Image: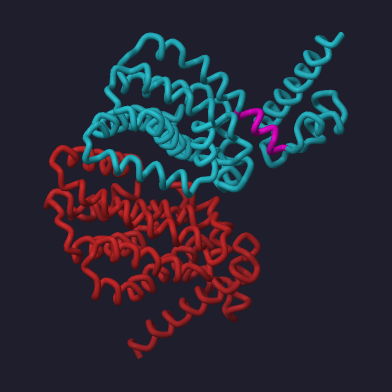
Chain colours: A red, B cyan
Amino acid sequence: MTDVKPAKSEQTRTLILETALRLFQERGYDKTTMRGIAKEAGVSVGNAYYYFESKEHLVQGFYDRIAAEHQAAVRPVLDAETDLQKRLAGVLTAWLDIAAPYHEFAAQFFKNAADPESPLSPFSAESEHAREQAIAVHREVLGGSKAKVPEELREILPELMWLSQMGLVLYWVFDRSEGSERTRRLAERGAALTTRGVTLARFRVLRPLVHEVHELFTDFLPGMAQAASARKR
Amino acid sequence: MTDVKPAKSEQTRTLILETALRLFQERGYDKTTMRGIAKEAGVSVGNAYYYFESKEHLVQGFYDRIAAEHQAAVRPVLDAETDLQKRLAGVLTAWLDIAAPYHEFAAQFFKNAADPESPLSPFSAESEHAREQAIAVHREVLGGSKAKVPEELREILPELMWLSQMGLVLYWVFDRSEGSERTRRLAERGAALTTRGVTLARFRVLRPLVHEVHELFTDFLPGMAQAASARKR
């Protein structure tokens, strides 16, 4: 019996999350309420709140799911390619594929997610789990490539690569081109530019700049500091 | 008589703009209507619409005013300093001083301004005038400094410096620290980092990267392309 209960609660959690995501898409994020989600999922409102404290927490569950799906989707390119630019372009494109069904409502909750102090922000304490998963992907993009990276930059470059992905996501949120075609081109161009940046970061004269850029983000974005301290633990 | 009419219309325009700014601050941006602005300014609704097509156009008037005030406020530091870092820090800090009274309602209309296709976006065609004024300040920051800048980068570095200022503005919008103290520290740190970047951009090996970063923004942000073509005219 002890095995069954966690499994059942996991099922209920998944049911609530999937119902919420469907309603976010059908009705829009702002118009979807916890009450409406509970009703549609066939659970009590109290039960819905037991699993997710708020609509924001449902979005965290959504972030975690996107991150998990992304980790699975990048296997083919990360297992086959050693060229940094191709690895990075593949990883960014895979993210756009996975996020495509949610494009419409991403624009809606963007106004919350853009606030670094909102739990919906990719830089918030609440987003740490999804963020760590996403940074881990970039660590593998770099580590599994044939690019030569000095030891002192191996930990911080993946965080900067993830930051540039957040820039891509920001662009995608507002991209109205068919199939987010403009963002896809930006992903390819960004991968080329990042690869050139990583190649140049080898030069000793540039390394202090890379450290300073990273320190700037760590000092001013709360989530980045947590990522840094988690690394040191 | 021909001299008087333009002056009167300029007065009416200023009156409407100032009333709007006051109401934006008192009532909030979303809750302020063109009708309410006209009433408070003592002009007809039709007259208000004659000067400003929409609330968005009032915000453009506001951007222009901020840009003009900023151009005046930076004179002391730009006339006295030749050190690039001090010039840049002074210019960024002056902007924060001027924008301070509007901090609260900046967060409100941010959700519109963040969309690059919105007329409120700093990258929109509608914002071109304010943007050109702001980029001109950065051109003077660089040109009047004793920093050695290769000819091929003299036109594009000020646009990249302005872009980094937009990053600072984004941070400021969500900064809840007393007197935007965190953003002020970020401005100082950002000025130091930008100065180091400009210094490094002299190295031949790095120049292609600077060009590519600039081209990326020009190709993917509509307003940047306009700035580039305006330069070539």
- Residue shown at 65%/68% (left/top)? A27
- Which percent across, then down, holds residue A97? 45, 70
- Which percent across, then down, holds residue A96? 44, 66
Residue B92 magenta-highlighted: no
Q: Which residues are magenta?
A: B55-63
Residue B62 magenta-highlighted: yes
Side (left or right) of A37 relative to A100: right
Side (left or right) of B208 relative to B218: left
Quarter containing the N terminus of chain B: top right
> Observer-nearest residue: B114 or A2?
B114
- Residue B176 appears in view: no
> Observer-nearest residue: B114 or A20?
B114
- Which percent across, then down, holds residue A205? 15, 37
- Which percent across, then down, holds residue A142? 22, 60
**A116 w.r.t. B67: above or below:** below
The number of discs equals: 0
> Observer-nearest residue: A107 or B83?
B83
Quarter containing the C terminus of chain B: top right
Side (left or right) of A31 relative to B157: right
**A111 w.r.t. A6: above or below:** above
**B63 w.r.t. A67: above or below:** above
Q: Residue furthest front?
A: B233
Give the quarter of the image for residue B141: top left
- Residue shown at 81%/34% (left/top)? B49
**B188 w.r.t. B174: above or below:** above
- Residue shown at 78%/29% (left/top)? B51
**What is the magenta segment's predominant secondary structure?**
helix
